[in-house]
Image (cartoon, rainbow, N blue to C red):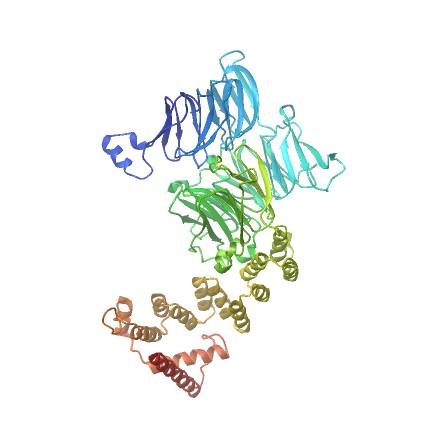
Amino acid sequence: AGSRGAAVFGGDGAVVFGRGNNLRIVSTADVGSKEQSAAKKNVPGNEVKAWKAHDGVVLSIDWCPALDGRIVSGGEDRRYKVWDGHGQILFISPARDHAITAVRWSPTGQHFAAGSFDSVWLCARDGWTNGSNDTGVGSAVSLAWARDGSSVAGCGGKPPFVFTGAVVDVEHLWDDIVVSRCGVTKLCEVTIHTFRNERSALDTVDDGVSTYTLKTGTERVSRLSWRHGILLVVSPKQICLHKSGAWQTPVATVDVSDCVVFIDQSRTGFAFVTATSDVVHVYTYDGQKVCDLRSDGLFPQSLDENVFSKSPDCVTFVDRSAGGDSMTCVDLSHSSSNGKQSGDGSGYKIPHSAKIQAVKLNQVGDASSGFRILAFLDSNKDLWLKRVEFAGTAAGGGHASSCVKIKSMVDCFAWSEKCDALVAVSRSQIVAWRCPVVFFTDNDLVGLTTTSKDLVGHGVGNAQTKGMLTITRFDGARVTVQNDDGARVTTSLCANSAFFPQLHNHAVGEKGTAKQWDKAIRLCRFAKDSTLWATLATHAMNVNELETAEIAYAALEQIEKVRFLQTVRKLEREPVRAAQLALFKHQVHEAERILVHGGFLFRAIEMHLRLFDWDKALQLALEHRTHVDTVLHFRNEYLEKSTEGGTGGARREDKPAFIAARREVEVSATQVLLKIAQERTREASHGNSDAAKPTRKADAEKSAKSLSSKTEKARASSRKT
């Protein structure tokens, strides 16, 4: 790998090699007997791919260790090029002075090095150049990276034959603070640039930017991670945790046995992997160990930010054991001491129909709702959302909630740093979903809570980018997009973009504070923006804040929903009210669970009857041995009113379960109406059918006669119509 010859990609067992000016990808189907090869070639994805890569002979190839399988190649045409796993060109470098003789990806997959005569270039994974140096060793014959990706070495054809270099000045931006390692002569120091008015006495102010130099002693800084107000300074022996504004002394330290090759942060903790470890270590920012994650589909040595995501409550990663077409979620609050997935529901798989390229969990959403939102991108460039629910919560039984496709032809996506918002780049257009939970709360508001902006004419998004746009930052109000040449453009999506992070803080609670719905309402009334009102309505319905939701829907002139909420607020029984709100959000299984656990079994059966889910209604009635005749009665009425195609007569029963139930249960319309009236009386008096006392027979018969009279009038009106 990284020289003339082949590079093996372990994920699919495929090999890429150069022949002349062409590149060729061959799967393991070409290895073995002819019968085995013929059988494997018939499997989709095992086809041989070949294409013209360079105008000259291909001199060096390397395959990215990350899951997306990018390929970098160098040739005699003095260019290096970046390809995806399907042979599509992603980046073409300018022509250099000499042929590109060596290329090599870093272990992290975030950079690669390209070597030529007396020169070496450090390039980002998208292809653009971070910097270059004169090696003085002639043509680079081979390149190699340190295990943590902090330095690169190479050899050439003339004395001194070997050169080494360190990766420095890689910026980490979060919350208007930029952190980077100092130059080659100061590998034990970290530079912190603050673009805010907050400065300390130790800062050096230059042109309105405060700068602070953090000295780590004698330990070389191998990696930095800066997110959520916590700076992680990684050295070969330990990880030091520094809090924003108090840089001098670390708040905690974590000892490591080897160099750290991967690290990921959330609001409450971080996860990391060492070079010799087969587990993912999870810690809090206090330095306390949470667990060690182990799984058959988790390959710690090949993790990157696209295939692993940590939130304050759970962890999600791409399951490699299934070929990359499924994800595994682990609830950290219910994981065992060693993080091993058990049968208690703390770890469960999410299958998908295509390979997963990137997964990301929202970080600053409202965890009181009992779920997180997982956004993932598949190989078809479709962006999906999935509710990741926590085991042991009220919503914990909803692991089977379906995925929602929200956008096609997506190049990249990112969650906001400060609010629960999602942004994506699609076909040179940037799209933002101000409150993605709307897909699981009220689909009618999806259009109102979505904003988009065309990037063409802003310095990015031209025809030559070929999908190489990346999102480097999204704070909820502004988004920064980076082009394939490294140029960055920051833009806002609409005139009122600055209000959305404030609205989120009022609706969700900022840094542990209580929700402030009155302030959120005043903010929307001040801005007079329908997108803000729709976002507020979504936040309110997500946590069942009915009064605020009613005001927001009224501002949107959705009167039918205002009347529905007014009706729900008048309901006296909490289980009935919660079930109605779950039905509003299209959560039928959750509504059934609430009604059954609350003792309103008949309402649960009636709900499925109104939804024409006959099988589920009969299953529920048989399971609890009640109201079987009620289900059969309404099924008979449905069949009588339905006409069979071509004959004009009533439809015949075609469900085996109903045919079998009819043989065992006698159906009487009078008895069914009497039972329904009794259920209504019980709910009105006590609200719990199990704890309610028997009502008087005379009142029940009177209610049954009234209900029967209304039914006959409805039938007569229907026949007349």
Give the quadrant of the N terminus.
top left
Of all residues shown, which one is farthest toward the right? 201
Q: Quadrant of the C terminus?
A: bottom left
Q: Quadrant of residue 671?
A: bottom left
- The residue sitting at the bottom extreme is 698
Q: Position of residue 403 (x, y in %)?
A: 43, 52
Residue 472's place in the image compared with 615, above or below, is above
Q: How many marks?
A: 0
| Rendered view: 258 above or below 565 | above
Choose between 275 and 666: the one closer to the eye. Answer: 666
> Is 387 located above or below residue 709 in the figure?
above
Residue 173 lies, in percent from the top left, at: 61, 38
Residue ID at (56%, 18%): 134
Where residue 294 sits: x, y (%)? 46, 42
Given residues 397 and 706, the one toward you in this image is 706
**In the orientation shown, which residue stands out farthest toward the front?**
457
Where residue 596 sits: x, y (%)?
44, 68
Name above or below for residue 387 compared with residue 110. below
In-front residue for pair 163/471: 471
